[in-house]
Image (cartoon, coloured by chain):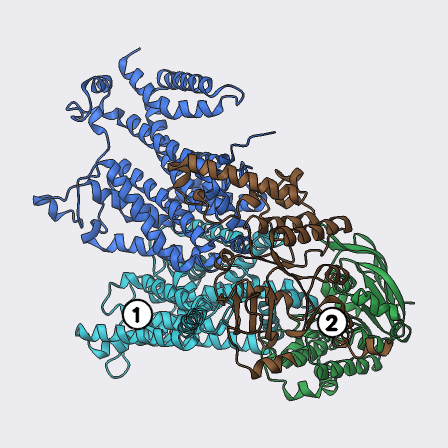
Amino acid sequence: MSQVVSTRMRLEERVKRVLGSRGALIALLALLIVAMWLLAAAQGIPGQRLLSLLVRGVMLGGILALGAIGLSLIFGVLRIPNFAHGDMMTAGAYLALLALSFLPLGAPLGPFSFGYELLVALVVAMPLVGLLGYTVDRLVFRRLRAQRSPPVIMAMAALGSAFLVRSLIYLFWGADFVFYYTGRARPAIELFAGIRVRPDQLFILGLALAMIVLVYLLLERTKMGKAMRATADNPELARVTGIDTESVIRWTWLIGGGLAGAGGIMYGLDAQLRPEMGWWLLLPLFAAVILGTIGNAYGALVGALVIGIVWQVSTAFLNPAYGPGVAFVILILVLLFRPQGIFGRPGGS
Amino acid sequence: MALLTIEGLTTGYGEMEVLRSVSLHVEQGEIVSIIGPNGAGKSTAMKAAFGLLKPWQGSVRFGEREIGGLAADKIVRLGMCYVPQTDNVFPSLTVEENLEMGAFVLDGAIGPRKERVYALFPRLAERRRQRAGKMSGGERQMVAMGRALMLDPKLLLLDEPSAGLAPLLVDMIFERIRDINDSGVSVLMVEQNAKKSLELAHRAFVLVNGENRMDGTGAALLADPEVGRLFLGG
Amino acid sequence: MESTAARRTPPRVEADGAQAALLRVERLSKDFGGLRAVANCSFSVRAGTITGLIGPNGAGKSTLFGLISGFMRPDDGRVYLGGEDITGLPPHRIFRRGLCRTFQIPREHKSLTVLENLMLVPPDQLGERFYNPLLRPGAVRRQERELREKARDVLDFLTLGHLRDEYAGTLSGGQKKLLELARTLMADPRIVLLDEPAAGVNPTLMGRIRDRIVRLNAERNITFLLIEHDIPLVMGLCDPVIVMNQGMKLAEGPPAQVQGDPRVLEAYLGGQYGAADD
Amino acid sequence: MSDVVLVRSLLLAIPLAFLATRAMPRRLPPAARLVLGVGAGWLAALALVLLVPVGIMAYLVSFAIVGSIYAVIALGLNVQWGYTGLFNIGIAAFFAVGAFTSALFTTTPPTGAAAAFTQQAFGLGAPFLVGVLAAGVAAGVLAAVVGGPTLRLRDDYLAIATIGIAELVRLIFQNERWLANGPQPFRGIPQPLSCLVRDAGCPYLPAPLMELFAPLAPRDYTYVYLAITALFVIVTFLVLERAIRSPWGRLLRAVREEEDAAAMNGKDVARAKLQAFVVGAVIMGIGGALYAHYMVAIDYSHFDPLYATFIIWVMLMLGGSGNNRGAIIGAFVIWGVWTGAAFAVDALRPVLAAISPELPARGPYLRLMLIALLLIFILLFRPKGLIGEERFVSRHTGEREA
């Protein structure tokens, strides 16, 4: 009798183990993309359009990655589920807008829709967003850490900060959407094989990749980057080793915030600026972070690319408004099958 | 003057008192071992020595400086490093990066220090690019000790360096501890493995139920049948 | 030695003494990122005994409790309770089969009173369904009254009666240990796993805990498996005693035999300490 | 005293009598508390109706209606967060699903020319109470779907998943015209018992009762609706108080505090959480239904994260999570702060205009800032809220000894 029970359980356990494996999750995601592709093809959508969407998906993934990497770092190093991360992206976009208003308007650079002044604004806005994050940490999170508040309370404080930041944006810029360059034409060009994208989007992709490379170098090559990874691994050990946790916290916010700011500016350049844009991005960001395993910056990049691609390709046959909904579906699939994400260890989180 | 002096230390976690008026000291150049049955408060004594627990009563002094409750990075700068019993490496960092983290408080070049650690643990030199999380228990212990040695401390605190290791590795680790001591580093260690640690230690303190029970030279305690009785309650 | 023998003979359900083995662990293993906490560990606990589980720090005792009670999944191996395979079941289902455990560091429900902590335990309470207190208040009240009586009996038995209406979070360390034991008694368990019942408990209270374990074992036929660092307590209370070292069973036998076993001494003290003495 | 004053005061007496009864000293026998409380409540209602100018009174009544609706939702959140520790930041989803479900159940599909302007998936023309029930069921089912995969996992995963479902629900109601008129307002949601204030009367009520309400004019309908929402608050409060003091509440609090210990005591932690999540969501759905029937016309924009999620969190955190009285008090206080701040901002218009010409139009966002700051201050300095959690031994023990 008991042997029968035991074999049945073993099968059940085995099935669970297979379903929860890394390969199964990757296969599931691949299947999802292929299924979408087939669905689109069945509706008679030309392959060229799908390829264009794929390229755009990679670009969107790049933007999301800028947000997701910082979110994952803050999650991993500081143990804060930063629900204000989306609004930090928004803040970056609007701070760049503010900087633009002080700069003389230059001619568009080459095929792009923007001039040198946007690059200046980018350089100005990024550290400001980092500083914003660090300021909130000093005023709010540091106190909560001292009180040994659980992550949920941190999350709630982050939510409060998110609404605070957004209220300031509403106050300064109002609720309507704006463009960095109102009325400037942004024609798409043909890359090759009929793939059409806007030059701006290529720039965004290039910039996102460049920043990701920078972050990689920072995390792998610099002392502070290594200390951040060490703190994410084991904060207690980092402390007794003598790592200056205060400066790790500072740099985590500066880097995470700076990347978020850049992501917001890129998103604003691609679409338009809205006070709610960061909130809408929050769900895809979290989905990317969980898909790529919390605390793993490279995982966040992979997760962001997957979600960007699926989001864009889904627009071939789905109302584009449902983009964040697609991210939600991926999130639920990951939570169902492999909550620790692609790069996580089983049992760990 | 003693390197580390603990006097009449009473402390614990939350409301639970673990140590009652414990005193011990480490002189320059010594290996001192704290032994005692499970639950005697050995690891707690170690944590208190490193300033991780605030003394309720009594004092912890490093040299002449009172360090009870001082921040860890300050203590590390004074020249005392601590190797916890478990979770004592950064698993996603490579061996080399783990060592670099040990020297975080230093600003200058740390190449020579790394080479010194590699000389002590050639095994680590072979695997310097490997992630610490993928290493065996003995190798991890070496990484952890090597990391603590990066600062060239005056005093090294080791919490059960042999826990969970196979006998051969235990011998190896104890030999390394002797090497470390020979290079001029004083060592305070907590050990489950009483026999081996008494053989190694110049002096030892026996804690039972959070109180000092016996102390003396390693050899004297080794010869004392009372110690065995304390452990197995015979 | 034991472990090599176990490897050679395939595990069989009807092993020696299977009738009496209430809890049986077969070749259980658990790794934590490269560290082998429990390694191919096999033993069984006979019904009606108070079995002690001792071993040096890091021997894997608490991990073993976690694996048996369903808080962790073993990487390999099986756990049988009364002949049934319970490997990998969630803790609440293992509990329902009559296995209770306590935690080394007590995990009381702090803002529930001591009485509520106990009344919480019995399974399948009518009132645990949202609608029953509204639709069948009488039946719920009756059941609650029974539970209260039972909880009071248990509290009186364990000398916690006077603390009934205190918040559990305000108890002393030793009282919390007693509360842990009290909660297991609310469930009429077949076997109770105690994780260091005496740690941090003053001698008076410890004597009381010890006395209650003996009485529960004799009067209610509850089997105990207990991890304890207080060796004198274990030697006086338990028979047999199982010694673990390095994640596996090292020795098993009556306390006197285990105490005299050179391998045990070696595990605890290292080297040939005990042998050199004699 | 005119008849209309009497009827208004009777309607107003429902919430006031309940409050007064609860406020009576505990040492009085229950019957005396009831009689005295009802008397005092009615007198207070009478005084209000007589002494406060009609315009201000109308404002206060509509204020109290919205406050009560928020109170219902805050009570639902209290089950999830206060008692079980579930971090749901997608309240808007359950709120919206409740509102639209009840609207669909109680309206009839448009015909003729109107059908060109309003699309809806179905319309059953069902009575108000059926709509409310359906709203609760729909929100509960949604909660089960979201909670199933996430409640087994870490706390923060639920939060993320609930953000997701709130977004998804909003997107669906915004984009799917066939479902509930998409981006256009969904109009014509019936007002329950509005027949009381109309000349035609309610055919299903006995004539003498109709006689009583005869003096009411259509503009008095808010009094009727306040009585309805107050009844919902009272019933929800009483039900939850009872449930929370039962073994169910004990189980939830145990799970909130020490999940492992609860599991080791044989409790199916995931199921307990799911129960609490679903019950809380059902209450939120009912709150949504109350909102829909008050607004008469609703659209997706009513359920944005600010009005439908964030402000409710601040209400509960201010009042004191884990305390049903606190949830209700918090709802009214924050709703008072929110509306009061509107007056303050209005008064400050000249100042704002002096700072920047665009600022007066953006004045409302000052309120958002205020509320966000308030939440942060509560978390930092008064995490238990105005009144902390109550201490209770399960009421069903029948034990109330000193």
Q: Is residue A289 above or below residue D315?
A: below
Camera-nearest label, 2 or 1:
2
Residue denoted by label 1 = A312
Chain B hue? green
Q: In the picture provided, is D361 more to the left or to the right than B53?
A: left
Judging depth in this view, the residue of D391 and D376 nearest the camera is: D391
Mark 2 neighbour class, 10 Å CA radius: few under 14, some 14 to 19, many 20 or more: many
Q: What chain does badge 2 belong to? A: B
**Which chain gets the cyan colouring?**
A
Q: Quadrant of the C terminus of chain C?
A: bottom right
Q: Quadrant of the N terminus of chain C?
A: bottom right
Judging depth in this view, the residue of A281 and D31 nearest the camera is: D31
Q: Amino acid at mark 2?
A: Glu
Residue D104's quadrant in the figure? top left
Q: In the picture provided, is D196 more to the left or to the right than B224?
A: left
At numbered mark 1, what does the secondary structure look like: helix, strand or loop?
helix
Residue denoted by label 2 = B160
**Which chain gets the brown colouring?**
C
Q: Name the spot of residue D373 as percent of width and height, x first.
A: 50, 45
Q: Name the spot of residue A35 as percent of width and height, x first.
A: 27, 74
Q: Name the spot of residue B201 as percent of width and height, x first.
A: 85, 75
Q: Is residue A112 visible in this depiction of the protein?
A: no
Q: Residue at x 61, y 29 (%)?
A: D402
Q: Is residue B45 above or below residue A202?
A: above
Q: Is residue B132 visible in this depiction of the protein?
A: yes
Q: What chain does badge 1 belong to? A: A
| Distance between mark 2 and mark 1 Cα atoms | 55 Å
Residue C47's quadrant in the figure? bottom right
Q: In the picture provided, is D54 more to the left or to the right than B43?
A: left
Mark 1 neighbour class, 10 Å CA radius: few under 14, some 14 to 19, many 20 or more: many
In the picture as drawn, the residue positioned furthest to the left comes out as D112
Chain D hue? blue
